[in-house]
Amino acid sequence: MAAMNFVVSAVVGQATKFRQRPVSVIYKMLLLLGTVLWLKRMALTRVNSLLPAIQETKNNVIALEDNAKTIRMNNSTATLTDNTTFVSPLEAVPTSAPSRSMFPRSFDIGSDSLFWIGKGKICDLIRNITDVKTLGVEEPKYVREELPPPLVNLTLSCDDMVGNTGNWITALYHLRLVAALGRVDFQFQCESGMESVDSNLLPWFSGRFPAPSSSDWPYDYGWPDPDRACSNVYAKLPLHHLAHEMQRDMQSIAIAMLGSRNFNITRDVQEKVKKLEKRLGDRHGYPRTNVDIDDAAIHFRCGDVFGGTNKDVYGLIKFREYSTRIPNATTRSIGIHTQPFNASLVREADQDSIDNCEKVVHVLVDYLQARYPNATITIRNTQDDTLPMSYARMTMAQYTITSMSTFGIFPAIGSFGEGFYQKSGRQNRFAEEVAALLPNLSFMNGPILSSPSIRKSNWTDIIAFLTSD
């Protein structure tokens, strides 16, 4: 540009200097000046045509820098997946929206983001990738820019996580809650896919859960309190916001496994069953319509209660809690779901208490048989009584009763009939608010013989507590 201005100045200067020259000279000078001005105009037009491309490149660089900063901030929690997809203008947004050809969409998290100890990590990650300070209050950046929601992906080796199943399920529901609160997609999958569904519960809870499409909370009780959702205190878990969603999940798992059994099934549950059936395929032999379903199902936790734990939030409840809730006249079968009495089939933490567990379960069988003489009492803890099968049977029973257990609470919530759980100071605190919303879920608040007390008691005193009215 400077060179062109110099040429123009020179031409004008020469025209002034020789203004007394003949007309032909002046004509030639003016013709030269016109040519130079035309060339300058064409150059400016070309530069202006390149400005949008220059600005686009600048925007892409800024987007990359922002995302790189986010990933560095969360390096211990999230990384781009090997197959990270980038949003192209054709795939991502309407033609009127700005293009972001370098916008990363997928973030992997690990097991350190699970459970209550990982809640701070997952909330920090979602705040960063959505560019908000408070989840559920501010509109995410991708919404403002008319982009698809980011995906938070969790892939676990589910076959290595057969112990503490109730805790894993609780943690997965928490991740779904926080992802919905942050309005991002969440996906959970097992490394082996659906191959271990016969023996492992976690694959049944896998899937992709889309972000809410608007600012309206799609589940129960309205938007969760972000401070409570991101708290590191287990007792504050606000899973009651997913009350109906948990109920639908349990019922869809039971139907996919055992068939509809003439239950009244909602449209939402039917849609979930179709998705499960599609993922299961034909190779697992579901639904198994020949499996017996008991009128009443009792989840009897006894393994770590007899020695594996010393926490007062675990323990035994009186047997009368069962007999006062299961009707005598109509009950023809009661299934007791408890740990196997074979050491090779239980987790290491429960192996030392197998003998005591077997003794107390047989006392329970005798107690129930005396009060339900016309009913068949079955201990469901053989190798065929897998965790998924127990969940399905407990969900489909007319009466489902569980004590202090993160495992048994979910089929009680999902029960097609009536579900009951034992209230405790810390365990399953969220269930109290779930029970306030679901009319078929109730809590029991009877006496508890805690694990520390069991350790200090002799066998005679333990049986006296369990069988006394």
Image: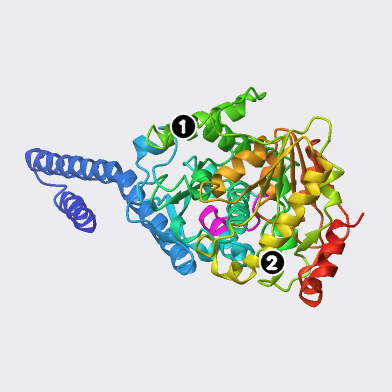
Q: Which quadrant would the N terminus be assigned to in this image?
A: bottom left
For image coordinates 92% across by 54% down, the residue present is: 469
Q: Residues within 10 Å of mark 1 (few under 14, many from 20)?
A: some
Instruction: Tell which of 393 and 435 is nearer to you.
Output: 393
340 is higher (above) or lower (below) than 219: below
Q: Position of residue 161 (x, y in %)?
A: 50, 60
Asked if residue 218 shows in the view, the reply is no
User: Which colour style is shown?
Assistant: rainbow
Q: Which residue is mark 1?
A: 277
Q: Position of residue 281 (x, y in %)?
A: 39, 33
Q: Count how many numbered circles sit on residues in the image.
A: 2
- Name the kind of residue labelled 1 in the image: Glu
Label 1 residue SS: helix
Which quadrant would residue 318 be assigned to in this image? Answer: bottom right
Which residue sits furthest bottom?
456
Instruction: Tell which of 95 and 422 is nearer to you.
Output: 422
Magenta stretch encompasses residue 431:
no
Instruction: Tell which of 368 and 307 is nearer to you.
Output: 368
Which numbered dot is residue 172? none
**Where does the magenta region start and end?**
125-137
Q: What is the CA distance from the residue labelled 2 to the residue labelled 1?
A: 40 Å
Asked if residue 145 shows in the view, the reply is yes
- Name the kind of residue labelled 2 in the image: Asn
Which quadrant would residue 215 be assigned to in this image? Answer: top right
N-term-proximal mark, 2 vs 1: 1
Q: Position of residue 350 (x, y in %)?
A: 60, 67
In the rendered view, does 463 fall on the left or right side of 78? right
380 is higher (above) or lower (below) than 230: above
Q: Which residue is mark 2?
A: 356
